[in-house]
Image (cartoon, rainbow, N blue to C red):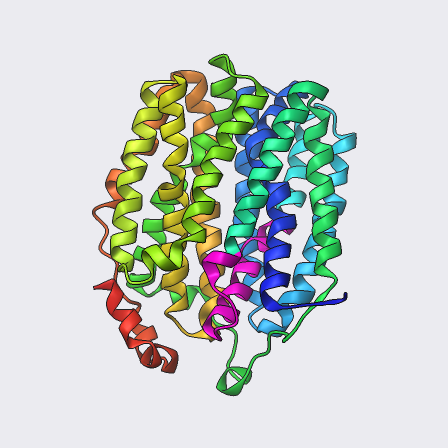
Amino acid sequence: MFTASPYGWVSQYLFGFFFSYGVYLPFWALWFESQGVSAAHIGTLIGLGFAARCLANVFLTPRIHKVEHLVPALRWFALATLIFGTLYFVAGGDFWLLAVITVLFNITMGPMMPLPDSMANYYAKHQLLDYGSTRVWGSIAFIVGSTAVGYLAANWGHQWILFSCLGGLAANFILSLRTPNPAPKTEGEFLTRPRPKLLALLREWSIVKFLLLEALIQGSHAAYYSIGSIYWKQAGYSEETIGYLWSLGVLMEVMLFAFSRRWFAHVPVKTLFTIAALAVAVRWGLAAMTTALLPLIVIQMLHSLTYALAHLAGMKYIQMGSEHRMVAMQALYNAIALGGSVALLTIFSGWAFEEWGGQVFWVMAAMGVAALFIRLDLPRSQLDESSMIKSEPSAQNLR
């Protein structure tokens, strides 16, 4: 009862967290709107959330560089996020109070995204689980959260957005109290190695190019995350329909993760990124041109390529490196590609939406085009790692 297999622990933690994130990402802007916050201020608040997660993943996540520290850290972050989330009940429509709570909430939420991935990567390298079939449970939870809350918000009011998010976080914390068996453990030469320095990693041009590539692809989702639901609501769609559209996107993500080993095990990482970049240009170009239902369905189906395939490619790239650097690389990926780039573009999107409306999506489409011109290389320092020597065939997938 109080222990779980690696697959069970990680997948169930991801389920609890991403249920809440499936409420937060699609519907937090609508909850802010229900509190009387303007579109420009909503963009700022959502952007502050991404920025706070970025800072947390720069300054907090890398300090947890030994794998045996992952489980205790995830428990504390789950509890703190739940506590800070309850403060939204007293915020009302006060922008500055909402801003403070949003920063606190997202600082503790930030590490809850890369650290489970680091656990999954650790166990995957030891052949105790498959990353794709484990991560898929987070995507399934996102669908459950966004679909359920779309229905609840449409029929019972926007207060259910907050109730449901906090309920998922409470379940997430309870599930985290179990112990994975076997527990993650640092072994061999990594016991005495110092914590990897992020600045040292950022001096490697190959890593900078990897982060820039991911920042362009993942950052292109900023307008979708911040004003997508508002845009569709203005086009005449109900919260329930908006929830279904979000769920459709993540359903496509689920399918990609579920069949990732069968479909992409031998596909070069560079090819995966090229497909994702092309999908970005097509997806957001369509979003800029129309809000008709059939094109929206196509737009959401492309989420499997613009987000999930790029994320899968990033995890494959990180797994190729040393176990000692895994958490640091994961932190940089989440801080820059999933945090900083999205934060800046989210703030921009809130302003641009008020000025240009749906035409803001052309900027997102252009980012996919720019990503096509970045050539991905293997980090030079990783070539000397013993783990790379053992997985030389995988390294060739970049060529």
Q: How many marks?
A: 0
Residue 111 is a magenta residue: yes
User: Foreground: 7 or 311?
Assistant: 7
Position of the N terminus, as image quadrant, is: bottom right
From the viewer's perspective, is 281 left or right of 258?
left
User: Foreground: 134 or 373?
Assistant: 134
The residue lying at 46 percent from left, 72 percent from top is 125
The residue lying at 42 percent from left, 43 percent from top is 341
Q: Main secondary structure of the magenta part?
A: helix
Q: Position of residue 181 (x, y in %)?
A: 65, 73
User: Foreground: 320 or 93?
Assistant: 320
Position of the C terminus, as image quadrant, is: bottom left
Q: Position of residue 87 (x, y in %)?
A: 76, 37
The residue lying at 56 percent from left, 25 percent from top is 41
From the viewer's perspective, is 40 left or right of 393?
right
Residue 110 is a magenta residue: yes
From the viewer's perspective, is 383 left or right of 100?
left
Does 152 sit above or below residue 127? above
Magenta extent? 108-134
The residue lying at 55 percent from left, 28 percent from top is 243
* Residue farthest toward the right in the current orientation of the protein: 90
Q: Position of residue 378 (x, y in %)?
A: 28, 67
From the viewer's perspective, is 311 left or right of 161?
left
Q: Position of residue 283 (x, y in %)?
A: 33, 32
* Residue farthest toward the bottom in the current orientation of the protein: 188
Q: Quadrant of residue 303?
A: top left
Does 344 sit above or below residue 353? below
